[in-house]
Amino acid sequence: MSNVDIRIRKTESLATPDELIKKFPVSEEIASSINLSRQVVNDIIKGRDHRLLAIVGPCSLHDRKAALEYAHRLKDLAEKVKDEMYIVMRTYFEKPRTVLGWKGLILDPNMDGSYDIGSGIAIARSLLLDIVSIGMPVGCEVLDPIIPQYIDELMSWSSIGARTTESQIHRNLASGLSVAVGFKNSTSGDLSNAINAIQCAYNPASFIGMDRSGASTIFRTTGNDCCHLILRGGDNSPNYYEDDVESARNMMIKSDLNPAIIIDCSHANSRKNYDRQKRVLRSVVDQVCWGEKAIKGFMLESNLICGSQKIPSDLSDLKYGVSITDGCLGWDETERILIRSCEMLHRSFQGDGQSMPL
Ligand SMILES: O=C[C@H](O)[C@H](O)COP(=O)(O)O
Ligand SMILES: C=C(OP(=O)(O)O)C(=O)O
């Protein structure tokens, strides 16, 4: 009697990254525009570009048509706010769950527990390609350590979520990713895990993974000098206030890190009430206008239509453009508050691009 894989019910083959890349290739023109947007993101994180990095988009993508419509609107908005903000579309395909729940388009594209991962990964890559093709840079959460092989060449920014910041696997991965990586503070609100993670990812690492041909490989990384902290609030309270930012900044400086902080307007900072993201953004803008240099940007969960919906048993009942994970701001409100924020930032920026301490 075999004692191997006693809890594996079934295995299925999956296309290798190379096979999928061949099916949905990135042209040289798109590759160079992604390189440019990665450079802008890195420049913002390193303080060489005074604009705020704005990671804006749905909590999760589940519908290709709505995602593309959103991307087109965001592209137009990005043009309007480009002097004060650099917008990267939040294109999250993997959802880390507190207990159980839909785990995102890559794992379960049919939203019915059938886990058609082969289709999910292909939809994610082709959708990202369509979005970057209109000139909209994208950013994803990196959760599964193999998935980046399928999509990471399309990303301009990425994050490691609150539930995985403490994981050595994710820290090693971040040390080898080609993009700037934001580490979220832990769900408890503790910052030290994220600060340790940034230090760890700054250094070279060696780890086992799968290469683009599908072979087992040892990856040896250079280390990533563009990692930063994302404040997302914690179990007991938000952490976007001035005092929180000041103490996060001081912790980073004490650890010899570039004090680069992004504020997540959602999650525990909004106490999961999507409309409260506005007050977080207001505080971000206010702090930047008052001269807080450590804040490099913010994250906003936004969709075509505000709110959220449960996944219905009959998918024809799904409402178009509404989140199936966390609640999001609707499009009109997103546009209004980003333009308003830019007006305020514009007034406080001097000719040299520096904000004026009041
Ligand atoms: O961003 C989405 C959710 O906050 C995250 O996936 C956790 O969700 P859950 O607590 O509903 O599982
Ligand atoms: C899961 C997310 O956030 P966090 O890791 O902060 O809970 C998210 O941004 O989708």
Image (cartoon, rainbow, N blue to C red):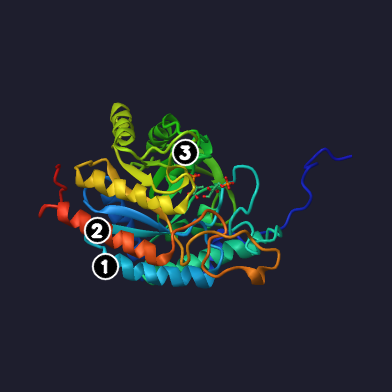
Q: Nearer the viewer, residue 278 or 132?
A: 278
Tell me whether the residue at label 1 lies in contact with that at label 3, contact meaning CB atoms closer than 8 angstroms: no
Q: Quadrant of residue 253?
A: top left
* Residue on which disc 3 sits: 171
| Dots 2, 1 in contact, CB < 8 A | yes
Q: Which residue is mark 2?
A: 342
- Disc number at residue 241? none
Which of the two discs, 2 and 1, sits closer to the camera? 2
Tell me how far mark 1 sits from mark 3, CA to CA.
Answer: 36 Å
Mark 2 vs mark 1, CA separation in Å = 9 Å
Label 3: state its secondary structure: helix
Q: Residues under labels 2 and 3: Cα distance?
A: 34 Å
Horizontal side of residue 281 vs 238, given as left or right: left
Where's the N terminus, which quadrant? top right
What is the secondary structure assignment of the residue under circle 2? helix
In the rendered image, residue 40, in percent from the top left (x then y), is placed at 28, 55
Question: Residue 174, relative to residue 320: is it above or below?
Answer: above
The residue that appears at 23% across and 41% down in the rendered structure is 292
Residue that badge 1 annotates: 80
Mark 1 vs 3, N-terminal side = 1
Residue at point 51%, 59% (across, down): 307
Where is 287 relative to 315, above or below? above
